[in-house]
Amino acid sequence: MLSGVMNVIYHVVMTMSAPTLLILYGSQTGTAQDTAERIGRQAQRRRMQVRVEALDIYNVANLISETLVVFVCSTTGQGDPPDNMKNFWRFVFRKSLPAGSLCRLDYAVLGLGDSSYPRFNFVAKKLHKRLMQLGASVLLPVGLADDQHDLGADGVIDPWITSFWEKVLSLYPPPAGQSPIRDDEPLVSFHSDVPQQPISPSPTHPFLAKVVFNERVTKASHFQDVRHIEFDITGSSIEFTAGDVVLMRPSNTRENVEQFCQLLRLDPDLIQRTNAILNMEPVSPGSIPARLAQPCTVRCLAETFLDIAAVPRRSFFELLATFATDEREREKLAEFSSAQGQDELHSYCNRPRRTALEVLTDFPHTTAELSVDYLLDLFPEIQPRSFSIASSLQAHPNRIQILLAVVQYKTKMYLPRKGLCSSWLASLDPRLGDVFVPLWVKKGSMKFPKDPETPVVMVGPGTGVAPFRAALQERIAQGKTANVLFFGCRSQSKDFYCSAEWEEMVKAGQLTLFTAFSRDQEDKIYVQQRVKEQAVLLWDLIVNKNAYFYIAGNAKQMPTAVCDALKEGFRSQGGMSSSQADEMLVAMERAGRFQSETWS
């Protein structure tokens, strides 16, 4: 009898039609998006209906009616969800959601993380537990990709995706006689067409802010070019407070766009004269990115959408290998595409920061075979860059200011490596004519106390001081003068940002300032040493006056070193054990009195 029931169940399962696969991603740097789109392309080739969306773009209220969803999400900061996942995160953890509200849903979670951070893949783990609480059924164990793996994140991603497709295709086998779309068939086709009317602007488009000021604030002899840039946002209705961030999507250089056109055998002069138009027709739903306007010029596509100067990910080599006709190039591309070849790929591509355009130059026979149909698959979309806002509207109405470190460094490559966004912004000179930058603002993670009597202690070496400049301008305008700043840099004479402003605030009794100039004496001095030296003051501010403590800056050693110095003060001034000092800092973090914003 049981055998007969099992046969009926098996027959029902085997005859189920495949539902639409929904792939939702939360991505901070684009890696999770790249992985989600990779799974999406595999679904398209299996002729499944598929949608790939950022979690905050997706209408989360529809999740109750979904049947098959893959979540690909990274973890940022101190175990936080990515920016394009935060609204979804708040919704899905509402206590009012019924326990069985997602009982129809089969799901899988793939997390992207780094085990060198304390809350490794925290977002993926917590999301998995929450989905189970809401009644969803998990298809396979949570994938916990780790950048520290011997093969990188792909050491986990590859076998996880293989297991995922084995599970899905066992539940929803393809119809008899239906074969997958071959790897050499495009999923998106481009063709020339007659230009149509341009798309009207909408409120969702970034605001074109005029650059009104762009000056270097480090000495010419200093190795690092740091810029103070100001944007005019008059008429934008943009509002922000201290701790918020501004986002910008950069453009590629003219030289790279010309090289791109040459490699793809497109005449840039012809494009300029004829304004050649490309229209895109999706082979399957979800193939065309939502941001890409249609029709689209080749130049617009190369300048503002395709990340042609990025260090390519593995998916780039996987697709490139399908075009290879030269045996030596095909073998090398196949090696770079394999899980076993990731060390070799890292040495060739990631370590020297070789760009996609340079890779195409290294594989001339394969590049000659490339089809323009594959541009959207081959090159990822340019990701927006975020910057801490370094000014307050109360001090600078209708303006946004940032402190920008221009990224440039040498590797074994002949040409120096340059940061796409920082180099682009540094090149915009308002003295030569009007220049505009598309930008928008989002809430930051830092929150400052409203009580005017509550002190704030801010540790911001280098450009990490940017959000604290905004906070100081805002707090002083509100009459809040209990402000302590620890600032560090290499040299007082070369990279002491905003020194004149700090001096004025100190003279006015609005700021207590401690500085650490690491290279101005034989023994290097860093901000963590100044924090350690001020243990008595900090203990009084934190314990007796309920001060808030903030850290912003590079995520390498500084945040940990500052935390260690702070906890040492707890032990020396409060007579605490190491575990008690740890618990005190954790308690401050839970109460919002310890906050950090760091970046790598």
Image (cartoon, rainbow, N blue to C red):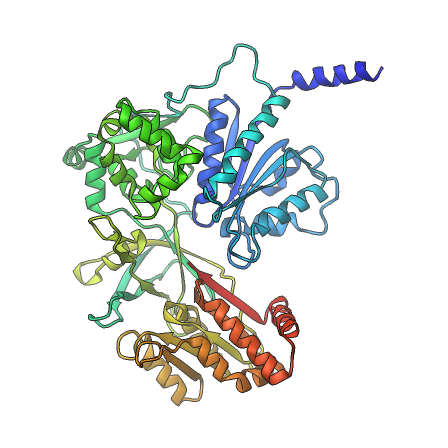
Q: At which x and y percent is residue 445?
A: 52, 62
From the image, which quarter does the C terminus lie in?
Answer: bottom left
Figure quadrant of the N terminus: top right
- For the point 42% across and 82% down, which residue is it? 514
Decide which of 335, 507 is in the foreground and name it. 335
State whether residue 34 is above or below residue 597.
Answer: above
Residue 120 visible, this angle: yes
* Residue at figure coordinates x 20%, y 71% from the top left: 221
Left or right? Give the position of 221 relative to 20.
Answer: left
Percent x, y for residue 241? Answer: 47, 67
Q: Residue furthest right?
A: 1
Which image quadrant is residue 189 in?
top left
* Nearer-the-camera pick, 466 or 518: 518
Question: Which residue reaches farthest top?
Answer: 177
Q: Is residue 160 left or right of residue 579?
A: left
Q: Residue at x 58, y 78 (%)?
A: 451
440 is higher (above) or lower (below) than 395? above
Q: Position of residue 324 (x, y in %)?
A: 30, 25
Using the rendered image of the protein, determine whether residue 192 is visible from the camera's viewpoint.
no
Quadrant of residue 408 within the rendered picture: bottom left
Percent coordinates x, y for residue 334 in the rendering: 36, 29
